[in-house]
Image (cartoon, helix red, strand yellow):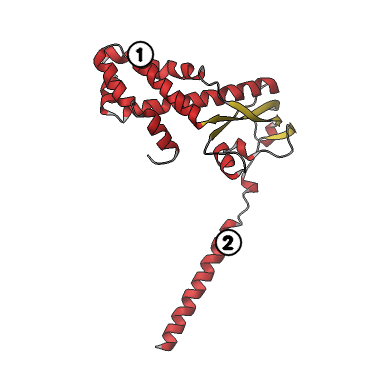
Amino acid sequence: MLKLSLVTALTLLLVGCSSKKKEEKLEEVDNTDTIKLDYEVREASSNKRPTWVENASQWAEETEGKEPEKYRYLSFQTEPKVSREIACNLSRANVKADIAGEVVTFIQKELAVSKEGQASIDPNNPETKPMREFVEETLVEKIQSLINGASVVNTYWEKRQYLAKLGAKKDYIGYTCSSLVRIEHERLKAMVEEASKKVIAKADDPETKENVKKALENATVNFEKARKGEI
């Protein structure tokens, strides 16, 4: 019985060591050769590509002094453009469009998950068509005009030489630009409230207006809960 226990213990130990080695080996896999770039960086605004380019929120969480509980950080990287100025202007504009788009998407979600909201924006109801079009096509532009609390924290640009021999469609020079923008969570909540008011105001008949109002009455509260992962 003792011999059997010892054999079992040794077997489990060996299996555990083997699994650990496999895990360590997986962690050490080098993916460098699997990532193929079709360009070479000729110039850049800094020697090292900032981590916020890929994930601004994670960067803020991991960087001391960024106060992620107070501020929301977003970034946007452009496709290659003919000049650095055009690329960086587009990058800044697109970050703000993303902020507005996030607010509008949340408003649409609030309407969709509410029975009142579903009834009030019924696509088969011609009375609500103007309001639905307003939400889908115009509200982003309206919200962008409210973005006065967002500030550009940093900018990173690259001058890239795309090469056909590396897989590009042709040889050409292009500039990409990434902008990091910061905005207070409280300001975002205020924008949700303003967006809700604009949607309610767009409803024409009293019944629809009341239904939409009910659907959006907790929008700011739910927006904050969603940010914290509570819903």
Side of 145 where 206 appears, left or right: left
Q: Nearer the viewer, residue 221 or 101?
A: 221
> Mark 2 or mark 1: which comes first in sequence?
2
Residue 163, percent from left and from top? 70, 32
Callout 1 secondary element:
helix
The residue lying at 73 percent from left, 35 percent from top is 46
Q: Nearer the viewer, residue 47 or 190?
A: 190
| Residue identified by numbered label 2 | 24
| Within-10-Å neighbours for mark 1: few <14, some 14–19, many 20+ | some
Q: Can you tell which quarter of the image residue 171 is in? A: top right
| Within-10-Å neighbours for mark 2: few <14, some 14–19, many 20+ | few
Q: Nearer the viewer, residue 11 or 210?
A: 210
Q: Nearer the viewer, residue 66 or 91?
A: 66
Q: Can you tell which quarter of the image residue 95 is in? A: top right
- Disc assigned to residue 202: 1
Q: Mark 2 or mark 1, which is nearer to you?
A: 1
